[in-house]
Image: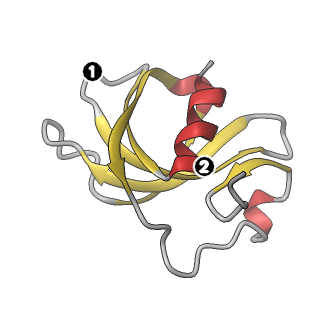
Amino acid sequence: MHQMMLCAAIRERKIVRLKLHDDSFPILFEPHILYTSREGAKLVSGRNRGSQLNSFFTPGWMTLTVDGISTLDMTGTTFQPIPGFGPSEERYGGSIICNVLQDVD
């Protein structure tokens, strides 16, 4: 379920609000790419916009396991892809499911 919503947010370039299983504070996240790692884990990478309630989540690039997300909501706010983002980077070498640079139908 999270995979489908993440791909929709990536295609539409919408910020998501999510909580991780081990944290009760939501973070705002700009998902750029969803992929399967070489080890088989589903991962999402993007820009963390931070949390107003938890200073541990400082803004910046981060990668999360999809299984580690407990709640996920798409906001109505759009974002622009980070300049220089490239889905062909080696770290995405497993299998790309969706990314912000794919053509939108």
Where residue 3 appears, x then y in whole percent?
A: 65, 29
To which quarter of the image does residue 104 belong?
A: bottom right
Secondary structure under the numbered disc 2 in the rendered image: helix
Q: Marks 2 and 1, Cα distance to the nearest angstrom?
A: 27 Å
Mark 2 Cα-neighbour bin, 10 Å: few <14, some 14–19, many ≥20: many
Taking the spot 86% from the left edge, 51% from the top edge, the residue there is 94
User: Which amino acid, by three-letter code, is at mark 2?
Assistant: Arg
User: Is disc 1 surrounded by few (<14), some (14 to 19) or many (20+) residues within 10 Å?
Assistant: few
Label 1's element? loop
Q: Which numbered disc flags the more N-terminal residue, 2 or 1?
A: 2
Mark 1 residue type = Ser
Residue 88's tag is none
- On residue 24, the disc is 1
Read off the residue under disc 2: 11
In the figure, residue 87 lies in which quadrant?
A: bottom right
Q: Is residue 43 above or below residue 24?
A: below
**Image x and y of residue 54, in percent:** 18, 38
Q: Where residue 103 sits: x, y (%)?
A: 72, 61
Left or right relative to 91: residue 26: left
Q: Is residue 63 visible?
A: no
Quarter occupied by the N terminus: top right
- Residue placed at 72% from the left, 51% from the top? 105
Q: Residue at x 29, y 47 (%)?
A: 57
